[in-house]
Amino acid sequence: MIKTFAQLLAEEKIDTIESALKVALTNANESPFWSQKVMPLAQAVLAVLVPLRDQGLLFDPEGKPQPRLTSELVLRWCDLVSLKTLAFTLQKSNEAGRLLRTSLPEEACAAYAPIDLTLLGTYLSGYMVNLENEALDFPIAHYNLHTGIAGALEPLMK
């Protein structure tokens, strides 16, 4: 049985989801420029959202609880500003040992297990996002490039 992308996001491991995205990317016949950039974004986002899904702690960029990992939620987090906010939220949560900056129930936030931010940090630093100071902005050219990458990812997740 072939699973839909929604089913993959809801229940599969990161490797399985990434494999499906690679197949979709190959079948999309996307230009090599975008093809090379789409997977690092997808890997960075999935590296944090799947562990949040597995902990039952998904939330949207406004901090509101989300019942499941969907293409729409992934794409909302693909915005560079949102992704930067997610990185700082999880970094602070890792340090605190509880999920911060969300409206999830306190008992759920207390059960948060730290998430590895290596892939997300590497991706963001490649777009000149300062990972030391959340208040610092990044160059608009990097935002525009990232927006193009997110745009190339969107049709693959349908």
Image: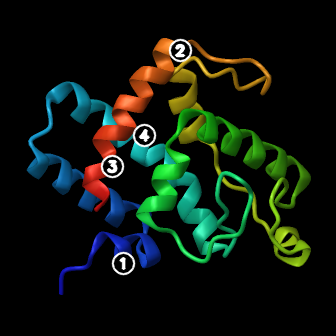
Looking at the rendered structure, the secondary structure element under dot 4 is: helix
Q: Amino acid at mark 4?
A: Leu
What residue is shown with label 1?
7
What residue is shown with label 3?
154
What residue is shown with label 2?
140
Q: Which quarter of the picture shows residue 71?
A: bottom left
Eyeballing the image, is 10 above or below 48? Answer: below
Which of marks 1 and 4 precedes in the sequence? 1
Which of marks 4 and 2 precedes in the sequence? 4
Residue at 33 percent across and 66 percent down: it is: 16
Q: Which quarter of the picture shows residue 125?
A: top right
Residue 135 screen position, x and y as percent: 80, 23
Tell me the distance, in whole angstroms, between the alpha carbons under discs 3 and 4.
11 Å
Which numbered dot is residue 41? Answer: 4
Tell me the distance, in whole angstroms, between the alpha carbons under discs 2 and 4.
18 Å
Tell me the distance, in whole angstroms, between the alpha carbons under discs 1 and 2.
35 Å
Q: Marks 1 and 3: which is nearer the front?
A: 3
Q: Amino acid at mark 3?
A: Glu
Which of marks 4 and 3 precedes in the sequence? 4
Q: Amino acid at mark 1?
A: Gln
Tell me the distance, in whole angstroms, between the alpha carbons under discs 1 and 3.
17 Å
Tell me the distance, in whole angstroms, between the alpha carbons under discs 4 and 1.
20 Å
Circles 1 and 3, Cβ within 8 Å, touching? The answer is no
Q: Marks 1 and 2: which is nearer the front?
A: 2
Q: Amino acid at mark 2?
A: Ile
Residue 74 screen position, x and y as percent: 48, 56
